[in-house]
C-alpha cells in the first residue's frame, strides 16, 4: 500500500507539480511585479520572488496614464467580431465539406488547411494592400476582417472533425421526416455540435485576443490599439521598459482569456475529443 | 395499394458495382426481408428505396409512382436505422413528434398519435426521458415509435435488431411481427441474420454480390434452394457439401464417394441422368442426418464421431464419413460419444444436388 502511494507520488504528483510550477511561474512573476514599487523591483539585495512592500503605483500608471481600458475594449471588440465572423463561415464551410460531399469537397478541405499553414509574416504584405483599398486602415474593422483569414481555416478543420462524429443517420432520418438541409443544420447539427462550436469559438477568441503582428501593422493611433500592441508600444519607450505597468497590463490582459477557458472547460474538452454521446 | 416496384435497379460507387439488375415487386402489406452477407448490397438497395442513395440505373416505383428523382421526404416512407438515430438532444416525445411537426400536423393530433403509439409500444412512461437515459431495447422501441407515428406507406428497417442482445432480439422479433400483422403496412427489412429472415419474412430475397439469388417464402427457399450459395446461407447449422460421383446402378442412379453410396430418389432421376459418370455436389442439411442405430443398409453412412457439441434442443455431431467431414444434428437423447462409430441415415428425399460448375441446383 505504502509502496503504491510512493510510486504514485513519483510517477504522478511530482511531475504534475513540476509542470504546474513551470506553467504558473510566469503568472506569479507578473502578479509579483505588478504589486512591487520600482524601488523594490530594482533592488538586487531583496528576494525577487517575494513582495516586501505592496504598492498600487503600477496599476495607477496603467489605468490612468495609458488608455489601457480603451485597449481592453478594442481587444474585446476585435476578438468578438472576428470570432463571430469566423464561426459563422466555418460552420457552413465545415458542414458543406463534411456532409454535402460535392465534387472537390475533400480538395477544398485540404485547400483550407493549406491556408492555415501560410505564415502571417508573408500574408500581411498583400493584406496591407487590401486594407488600404478597402479604406479600413487604422480601423478596428481591419483586424476584425483580417483575423478570420487564419481563424476560419482553423475553426473549419476543428468543426469538420466534430461533424464527422455525428452519425449521418440522424440527418438522414430528419431528411425522411421532411426536414430541409438548412432546418437539419439549425435544429440537429448545431445543437449537437455545441461543444465543438464552443471550443472553436474559444480558440478563435484566444487567438484574436493575443494576435500581435497584424495589430501592430494595421493600427497606428494609440486609442485604437489592442492590449498586446498597446502595452509594448506605449510602455516600452526606446530602451526603457516600464516593467511594473507592463506586467500589470499583461496580468489584466490575460484575465478575460482565463475566465473564458474556466467557464467552458468541459465543453472545450468534449469539443476537442469530438465526443458525442446519445 | 403501397406496392414497391424495383425494375433493373443498379448502383455503382465509382467502378464498384454495389447492386446489379435488381428486379423485385414487394406487394401491398407484405413483409419482405432482404438477407445476405455483409457487402451484398441489401442496405444499398434499401437506401435507394428510401431515396438516400441515388440509383445508377433502373426504376423504383412506390404505389405506382416512379420515385427515382423524388426526394426522401416526398416518398412517404419511414425508416428504422441500425443505430436507432434518435436525436440525443430531444426527449422521447420530441423525437416521436419530430416528423409530425415538420408535416405541420395540429398539436392536438400530434399529442394523440404520439401517446397512442407510445402506449402500443409500452413506452408511455418514457416520453419525458432523453435517449441517453434509455436502455438498448427502449431506444429500439422509440425508434420504432418514431416510424410508426407517421403512418407512412412503407416501412424500411435497416438491421434494427442487430445492436440488441440475443434474448431481447428474439422478443423484439416477435413484437415486430405482431406489429406488422396489426398495422399491415408494406415493410422491407434488411438483415444478415438468416434466422431473423426466416422467422419474420412473408417472403425473403437472398442476395449476394449485389444480385438477387432467390426470392420466395422462407420454407420454400429452405426446402428448394436455387443454388449452392442459398443452400449454404439459409439454414442453421449450415448445409454439408460433398463432392460425389453419379453412377448408374440397375434402373436407378447412386451418388458415391469414398466410404458411401446413396441412391438418388425416383423423382430426381431424370434431372441427375445427364450427370452419369460425372461429379456433382451433394448437399445434406445437418438436421436431415438421423442417427441410424445398427441398421446399415443402403443409404446408411458409417461415421466416425470427432466432436460432440450439445446445444440443448439438439446435439451437433462432427463426424468423418470416408474423406468427408460432416455435421449432423441429432436429438438430445442421443448417446453418441466422441471417437466412437455411429450410423447416419440421410433423408434421401431431402438431399440436394448442385452442378459443380454453375453451382445451380439440379432439380
Image (cartoon, coloured by chain):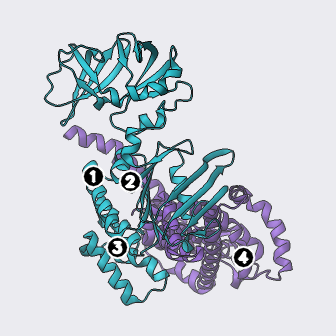
Chain colours: A purple, B cyan
Residue drawn at point x = 18 percent, y = 31 percent: B331
Q: Can marks 3 and 4 be said to lie on one chain?
A: no
Q: Are marks 4 and 2 on the same chain?
A: no
Image quadrant where residue A65 sits: bottom right
* Distance from Cα at disc 4 to Cα at disc 2: 61 Å
Q: Which residue position holds label 3? A: B92
**Residue B135 can be seen in this image:** no
Mark 2 vs mark 1: give the one in front.
Answer: 2
Structural distance between the alpha carbons of marks 3 and 2: 29 Å
Q: Which of the marked residues, 1 or 3, is nearer the chain's N terminus?
A: 3
Residue that mark 1 sits on: B170
Mark 2 element type: loop
The residue at which mark 2 appears reads as B201
Residue A84: percent from left, percent from top:
61, 77
User: The numbered mark 2 sits on a residue in which chain?
Assistant: B
In this view, B315 is above or below A24: above
Q: Which mark is residue A145?
A: 4
Instruction: Measure the alpha-carbon separation of dots 2 and 1.
Output: 14 Å
Q: Secondary structure at mark 3?
A: helix
Amino acid at each position: 500500500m505504502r509502496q503504491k502511494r510512493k510510486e504514485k507520488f513519483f510517477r504522478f504528483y511530482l511531475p504534475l507539480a513540476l509542470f504546474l510550477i513551470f506553467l504558473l511561474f510566469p503568472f506569479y512573476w507578473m502578479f509579483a511585479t505588478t504589486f512591487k514599487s520600482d524601488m523594490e523591483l530594482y533592488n538586487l539585495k531583496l528576494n525577487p520572488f517575494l513582495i516586501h512592500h505592496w504598492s498600487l503605483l503600477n496599476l495607477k500608471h496603467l489605468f490612468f496614464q495609458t488608455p489601457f481600458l480603451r485597449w481592453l475594449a478594442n481587444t474585446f471588440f476585435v476578438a468578438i467580431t472576428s470570432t463571430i465572423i469566423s464561426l459563422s463561415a466555418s460552420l457552413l464551410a465545415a458542414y458543406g465539406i463534411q456532409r454535402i460531399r460535392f465534387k472537390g469537397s475533400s480538395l477544398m478541405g485540404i485547400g483550407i488547411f493549406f491556408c492555415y499553414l501560410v505564415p502571417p509574416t508573408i500574408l500581411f504584405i498583400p493584406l496591407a494592400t487590401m486594407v488600404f483599398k478597402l479604406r479600413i486602415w487604422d480601423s478596428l474593422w481591419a483586424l476584425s476582417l483580417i483575423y478570420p483569414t487564419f481563424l476560419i481555416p482553423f475553426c473549419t478543420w476543428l468543426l469538420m472533425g466534430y461533424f464527422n462524429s455525428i452519425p449521418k443517420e440522424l440527418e438522414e432520418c430528419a431528411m425522411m421526416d421532411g426536414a430541409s438541409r438548412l432546418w437539419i443544420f439549425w435544429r440537429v447539427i448545431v445543437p449537437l455540435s455545441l461543444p465543438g462550436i464552443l471550443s472553436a469559438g474559444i480558440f478563435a477568441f484566444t487567438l484574436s485576443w493575443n494576435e500581435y503582428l497584424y495589430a501592430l501593422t494595421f493600427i497606428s493611433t494609440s486609442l485604437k490599439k489592442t492590449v498586446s500592441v498597446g502595452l509594448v508600444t506605449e510602455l516600452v519607450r526606446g530602451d526603457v521598459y516600464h516593467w511594473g505597468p507592463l506586467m500589470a497590463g499583461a496580468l489584466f490582459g490575460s484575465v478575460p482569456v482565463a475566465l473564458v477557458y474556466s467557464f467552458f472547460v468541459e465543453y472545450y474538452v468534449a469539443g476537442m475529443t469530438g465526443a458525442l454521446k446519445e | 395499394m403501397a406496392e414497391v416496384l424495383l425494375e433493373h435497379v443498379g448502383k455503382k460507387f465509382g467502378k464498384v458495382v454495389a447492386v446489379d439488375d435488381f428486379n423485385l415487386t414487394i406487394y401491398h402489406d407484405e413483409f419482405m426481408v432482404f438477407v445476405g452477407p455483409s457487402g451484398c448490397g441489401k442496405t444499398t438497395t434499401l437506401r435507394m428505396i428510401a431515396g438516400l442513395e441515388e440509383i445508377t440505373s433502373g426504376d423504383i416505383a412506390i404505389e405506382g409512382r416512379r420515385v427515382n428523382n423524388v426526394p426522401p421526404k416526398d416518398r412517404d416512407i419511414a425508416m428504422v436505422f441500425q443505430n436507432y438515430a434518435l436525436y440525443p438532444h430531444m426527449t422521447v416525445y420530441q423525437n416521436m413528434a419530430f416528423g409530425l411537426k415538420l408535416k405541420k400536423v395540429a398539436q392536438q393530433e400530434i399529442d394523440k398519435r404520439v401517446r397512442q403509439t407510445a402506449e402500443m409500444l409500452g413506452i408511455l412512461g418514457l416520453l419525458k426521458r432523453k435517449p441517453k437515459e434509455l436502455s438498448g431495447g427502449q431506444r429500439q422501441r422509440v425508434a420504432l415509435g418514431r416510424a410508426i407515428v407517421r403512418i407512412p406507406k412503407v416501412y424500411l428497417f435497416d438491421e434494427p435488431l442487430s445492436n440488441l442482445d440475443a434474448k431481447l432480439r428474439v422478443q423484439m422479433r416477435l413484437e415486430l411481427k405482431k406489429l406488422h400483422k396489426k398495422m399491415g403496412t408494406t415493410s422491407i427489412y434488411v438483415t444478415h441474420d438468416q434466422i431473423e429472415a426466416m422467422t419474420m419474412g412473408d417472403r425473403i430475397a437472398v442476395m449476394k454480390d449485389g444480385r438477387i439469388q432467390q426470392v420466395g417464402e422462407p420454407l420454400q427457399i429452405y426446402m428448394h434452394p436455387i443454388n449452392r450459395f442459398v443452400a449454404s446461407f439459409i439454414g442453421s447449422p449450415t448445409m454439408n457439401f460433398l463432392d460425389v460421383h453419379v453412377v448408374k446402378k440397375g434402373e436407378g442412379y447412386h451418388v458415391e464417394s469414398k466410404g458411401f453410396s446413396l441412391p438418388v430418389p425416383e423423382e430426381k432421376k431424370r434431372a441427375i441422368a445427364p450427370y452419369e459418370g460425372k461429379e456433382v455436389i451433394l448437399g445434406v442439411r445437418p438436421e436431415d442426418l438421423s442417427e441410424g442405430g445398427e441398421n446399415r443398409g443402403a443409404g446408411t453412412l458409417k461415421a466416425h464421431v470427432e466432436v460432440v457439441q450439445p446445444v440443448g434442443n439438439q446435439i451437433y455431431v462432427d463426424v468423418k464419413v470416408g474423406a468427408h467431414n460432416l455435421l449432423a444434428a441429432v436429438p438430445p437423447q442421443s448417446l453418441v460419444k466422441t471417437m466412437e462409430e455411429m450410423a447416419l441415415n440421410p433423408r434421401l428425399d431431402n438431399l440436394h444436388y448442385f452442378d459443380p460448375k454453375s453451382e445451380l441446383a439440379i432439380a
